[in-house]
Image: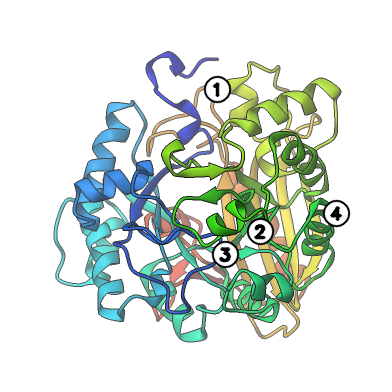
Amino acid sequence: MQWELCKMRKPTRTISGVAPLAVMLPPRPCAHGACLYCPSLNAPQSYTPESPAVLRAKQCDYDPSKQVKTRLKQLQSMNHPTDKIELIIMGGTFLSYPEKFQFQFVKKCYDAMNGKVSRSLEAAKKLNEKSKHRCTALCIETRPDVCTNKDIRKMLEWGTTRIELGVQAIDDKIYKKVNRGHKVQDVIDATTRLKKAGFKIGYHLMPGIPGSNPKKDIKMFKKIFKSSDFKPDQIKIYPCQVLKGAGLENLYYGGEYVPYNKEQVAELIIPMLKLTPRYCRIMRIMREIPPAYLIAGIKNIDMRKEIEEVIRKKGSKVNEIRFREIGFALRDNRKIDSKIKLKTTKYKASNGTEYFIEAINKDNILFGLLRLRLEKDKTSPATIRELHVYGPTLKLKQKADQEWQHKGLGKMLMAEAEKIAKKNKNKHIRVISGVGVREYYKKLKYKLDKDNVYVEKVL
């Protein structure tokens, strides 16, 4: 099955079931100052003036509405379905911007997807429930120390479903050395608050950060999944590079810091992939840094592809989500056994119990997943933090042929989650739903709660 790959540019962009659409924030320095590895240039924090996403944003004067409309046209011109959008707000600590700016920024994004300016954010969200371009997920990047309960309430009001935390390392000495401005306890606290609220959580990690070494990188990576304080759902691995305009540049030229080379990074990434549990997805490896701004560090942005080819040739066992997704199996023309079973992995995390429910086949290929969280207090609702059916993105109401969306896997996963919640004597279940997915949950007898945040059901 080719699912018209020959007509689609960059097919992997929508291979996981949604169309990612990133909007960039205007440049604004961090309140704590600059981290040692972060470039201080006329660009959004941690980016360079010529990064692809920055160039697109600058052409739109950083106007969120223009950015969304422009990107939608680009995705459509590449033949990608744009019915299911994952909106990503990036380029700095969004929650540090003025509150009025935050709400206006989010509303303008919804208005652009809707093709109509609404009178309020709530009206825009309501309209998006049945819009042509539905926001099925909203992701915000923030710092662990800029993630209070008040921030969480705002993010829920915006329809946010996923948070990416700039963790980099879990070591207070390293944080002090790189002027990170927060402590490991902030990571633990933010992770707990976010999970209790139902968010899906991603960590950004930086092997080779000043103060670390390969042995320490692996030790910290193991701790992230061994300790119940952490256990993120997703990870982006960005090996430390020396960028023009960063404080690290002076240390490099002074001979006080040397970044990892390609071989060292490969020797780290392979065991990291093997160590990643089946409930976590390695979202990305390497950042796309324009060569003119890269002083030192590896340049291979396609390193992941090379590493995965080595792993598959050796037949090494890797359980992380992206490695097992059906979309990539189809892309690689692998033979697919269509007999699907459910597998549940139970683990303790952030003072609660997580149930990771997967739809897989005998070859461990992943077709869909659900994350269910139960708190110790039985009066607290059971929370579904994520429901995702993988495979190439299909348009809304489009019938599946050989694809795996729209075949009832979501209903099967939801039924299993409800069964587990009932067995654990939970009387109430809720879902942190993207605004554009609410219609789907309504068909499963879920209703929007009184605060217009979660969809819920009495069991």
In the image, 68 versus 426, the foreground residue is 68
Which label lies toward us, 1 or 2? 2
Residue type pointed to by label 1: Gln
In the image, 394 versus 298, the foreground residue is 298
| Colour treatment of the image | rainbow
Regarding residue 47, the answer to whether it shows in the image is yes
Say which quarter of the image contains residue 310: top right
Q: Is residue 2 above or below residue 109?
A: above
Label 2 crowd (10 A; few <14 / some 14-19 / many >=20) = many
What is the CA distance from the residue labelled 4 to the residue labelled 3? 21 Å
Query: What secondary structure is marked by label 1?
Result: loop
For marks 2 and 3 on the same chain, the one whose residue lies earlier in the sequence: 3
What is the CA distance from the residue labelled 1 to the residue labelled 4? 44 Å
The answer to whether marks 2 and 3 mark residues whose Cβ atoms lie closer than 8 Å is: no
What is the CA distance from the residue labelled 1 to the residue labelled 2? 25 Å
What is the CA distance from the residue labelled 4 to the residue labelled 2? 32 Å
**Could you tell me how many numbered marks the image carries?**
4
What is the CA distance from the residue labelled 3 to the residue labelled 1? 38 Å
Q: Residue at x 58, y 62 (%)?
A: 200
Residue 173: where, in percent of width, then height?
Answer: 73, 74
Q: Which mark is residue 402?
A: 1
Label 3 crowd (10 A; few <14 / some 14-19 / many >=20) = many
Name the outermost residue toward the front: 254
Residue highlighted by disc 2: 371
Residue type pointed to by label 4: Lys
For marks 4 and 2 on the same chain, the one whose residue lies earlier in the sequence: 4
Which label lies toward us, 4 or 2? 4
Which label lies toward us, 3 or 1? 3
Residue highlighted by disc 4: 215
Q: Which mark is residue 166?
A: 3
Q: Residue at x 70, y 52 (%)?
A: 280
